[in-house]
Image (cartoon, rainbow, N blue to C red):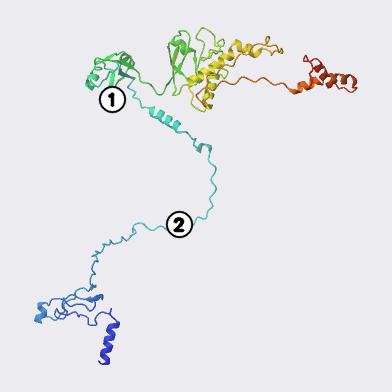
Amino acid sequence: MDTTAASRKRGRDDDPLECPRKQPTKDATAGDTPDGSPSTRDDSVCVAAPPTAPLPSETTGDSVAATPAAPIRIVGGKRRRGQRKTRSKRRRKQRVFEPSTTVAPAAPRPANTTVTAPHPPPAEEDFVTVVSKAAQRRAKALAAAAIATDPAVAGTVLYRPSAPGGTFKGSPRLTLAAAFAMRPDVVAVRINHRRNIVAADASTQPCLSELLTIKELNGIPVTARVPADRRTSVGFVHGVDGEPSDKQLLEGITSTVPVVAATRQGSTVRLQFAGSQPPERVSLCGIWLRATAVCRPRCVNCRGRHAADNPTCPRWQEERRVATLMAVAPTALSRRAVKAAVREESREVRSYAAAVKTNLPESDTTDPGLQRPIPAPRRSLLLPASSPISSPPAAPPAEPSEDPRDALSLAFLPRFGRWETTSPKATPCVLSASKQLACSPVPPRRIK
């Protein structure tokens, strides 16, 4: 083998990735580069052009213009076994932002070199008062209650079945509305079968009074009433003596909220106030042909000569005692039982025997026949909450044992008397002690 052939072979082995030196020309024919020709290496990448078929002009030789070559295609190596075919993703063209030519670009803003003054403190009107959620709900309900009224409607009457189990569901709407056809002042009739109610609007006050007298609708007994006005409130005063008229009640009631109407129902007076909330208290005075200055306050709870909210009221103190006992009890207690126990204790304090027992001076006599017997303490109705079973009876009190100091003092009594007469330095305390020992009725004893 010559040197030239060896160098060629070594050059091909050293550069295996290089494409074949012979490249296809533009006017290559199918015979020069067949489709089935294999590539030099499997893992090599080469550039090949597809064969072009000869045109008639080329074969005949009429034209010398060359045919344009097809676009160059990059052909890769063979696809390995197990490799999946991947499809190239379509890439959208990126949108190029084109500024509007009609609007001129804004000039750069100069730097702010001014010094801002500090803000003044907010005024008191700027603060928002914190309101609880319950107050917000009440305010919202009151605002929703303010319904726009029709000036042409003088009033509305509501009808409900008066018989137990009565209903308007069996009556058609037109039949119920036809019952008001003979009254020209009735503006509208509204029927609500779900709430079982019929509402009729009247344009005049006489028609409204006539609608309140209706007792039957389409053969169904009903009760008529005026709907409650949410702009007013109702309160009750219990325990009113006598039979005053509604006019006398209205004139004799004094309240912080104006009273619209007063109606007596037995010993209870129903008051209607011109406000969404009734007042805390009202005073009823001057209805028995007496001057206001002569009337005395009377508590409705205990009938005492004081205001109903005075802390000195016995009923007020009783309720306070009951609430305190129920609050400090470790277990739940019945309010009725606690109230009965508190009343039993208060009855014992107010009794004559309890007053005599507390005011009786203590007797100095030691004779058991002359001493007043001490009553046993009353058993409280409130059982201890620790154990439901009653505790065993207490043991009888033990008799007090004899004090040895008394015997010692009595033994030294004769000698102390002789020392008192002979001692020149007897103090007043010693003399008083000796007199007390001398007046003792118990004779002296000897110490064994």
Q: Are marks 2 and 1 in contact (CB under 8 Å)?
A: no
Whether residue 339 is visible to the viewer of this picture, yes or no, is yes
Q: How many numbered discs sit on the rendered protein?
A: 2
Q: Quadrant of residue 2?
A: bottom left
Give the image location of residue 444, x and y in percent. Answer: 79, 17
Q: Which residue is mark 1?
A: 194
Is residue 296 placed above or below 389 in the rendered structure?
Answer: above
Q: Which residue is mark 2?
A: 109
Q: Earlier in the sequence, mark 2 or mark 1?
A: 2
Give the image location of residue 125, x and y in percent. Answer: 51, 36
Q: Quadrant of residue 309?
A: top right
Q: Quadrant of residue 225?
A: top left
Tag 2 secondary structure: loop
Give the image location of residue 153, x and y in percent. Answer: 32, 21
Q: Amino acid at mark 1?
A: Arg
Identify the residue at image location x=38%, y=27%: 145
Is residue 39 placed above or below 405 in the rendered structure?
Answer: below
Give the image location of residue 89, x and y in percent. Answer: 26, 62
**Closest to the observer, 43 or 108:** 43
Say left or right for 338 vs 28: right
Quadrant including the C terminus:
top right
Dot 1 surroundings within 10 Å: few (below 14), some, or many (20 or more)? few
Q: Nearer the viewer, mark 2 or mark 1?
A: 1
Say left or right for 148 vs 38: right
Res. 75 mark: none
User: CA separation, marks 2 and 1?
Assistant: 69 Å
Identify the residue at image location x=30%, y=16%: 164
Tag 1 secondary structure: loop
Identify the residue at image location x=9%, y=77%: 56
Q: Amino acid at mark 2?
A: Arg
